[in-house]
Structure formats: C-alpha cells, structure tokens
Amino acid sequence: GFIKNIGICTKNILSKKFKPWRNNVSVSKEFIEYLCFQLGKARDITAKKMFGEYGLYLNGIFFATAENDNFYVKITDAGGKLLGNPEIVSPHEGAKMYLVENISDADFLAKLCRATADELKNEKSKNGKR
C-alpha cells in the first residue's frame, strides 16, 4: 500500500550513487524524499535519475520531472484545469511544463498525477506507440 510505495520510491532514488553533477539542475536529497512522500498517494510512482534531475513515472507513463528542487508536470488539459490555468515554464532547454508550486497537499497531487498520466496515456494510445 501507501507505505510500501514510499519505501520503493525512496529506495530507488536515494541510493549511495546520489551525486548530482550539475548544480543548476540538481535536486536535493531532502526535496526528492519529500516529493516522493507527497506523491505516495498516487500509487505506482517511480523516479529515475537523469542528469542530476529526476523523471517521474506513473504506471510507466512519464508525466513529470523534479528539477532545481521544483516539481514540474507535463502540459495536459486535465492538469491545466486542476492547477487553475497555470503558467507554462521551461525548467530546462527545450522543455515546456507546468510548475507545481504547492506540493504540500498530497491528495491534490495524487489527483494531478493520475489525471496527467491518464491523459498522456490516452494521447499515446490515439497516436499509436512509437
């Protein structure tokens, strides 16, 4: 359940190999621990380290990143409605995502994660697998 998911998420990302190599896109240990804890209610979240930042997946669907101690989700209609018409930002070159400023409400984050990943999964199904 919930506690198991937290353990899996933190075990995967807080290995002894955690050493961000670029300060401008690194994620602190404290931030990623807290974010994983907060996202635990969404279930089946995995975090994969990528160049000092993390890619976040829900049931295998890439839907978000953690960069510069901030949480970003991919742009979807469902996510935009839940976030209340958020500003589109560029966390790194070539990316356009929504910045999720409030990560203290775990229930809201679970709803946002599921809605975003579901829409991305449906888009992928419509467009076919590549």
Image (tube, helix red, strand yellow):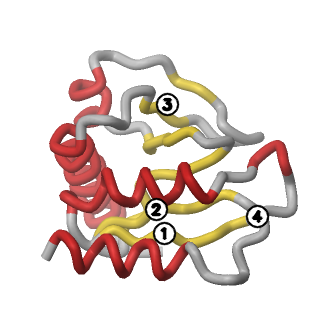
Q: Mark 3: which amino acid? A: Leu
Give coordinates of residue 1: x percent, y percent.
13, 76
Using a 10 Å C-alpha cutoff, classify the residue at mark 3 as few (fewer than 14 neighbours), some (14 to 19) or many (20 or more): many
Tell me how far mark 4 sits from mark 3, CA to CA: 19 Å
Question: From what the image shows, is residue 94 above or below residue 12?
Answer: above
Q: Which residue is mark 2?
A: 56
Q: Are marks 4 and 2 in contact (CB under 8 Å)?
A: no
Q: Mark 2 vs mark 3: which is more N-terminal?
A: 2
| Left/right of residue 68 with respect to residue 30 in the rendered view | right
Question: From what the image shows, is residue 70 above or below residue 130?
Answer: above
Query: In front here: 12 or 83?
Result: 12
Query: In front here: 99 or 119?
Result: 99
Query: In front here: 83 or 28?
Result: 28
Tell me how far mark 1 sits from mark 3, CA to CA: 17 Å
Give coordinates of residue 72: x percent, y percent.
50, 41
Q: Quarter of the image holding residue 125?
A: bottom left
Q: Are marks 4 and 3 in contact (CB under 8 Å)?
A: no
Q: Which mark is residue 47?
A: 1
Give coordinates of residue 19: x percent, y percent.
78, 69
Q: Mark 2: which amino acid? A: Leu
Q: Which residue is mark 4?
A: 51
Q: Are marks 1 and 3 in contact (CB under 8 Å)?
A: no
Q: Secondary structure at mark 3?
A: strand
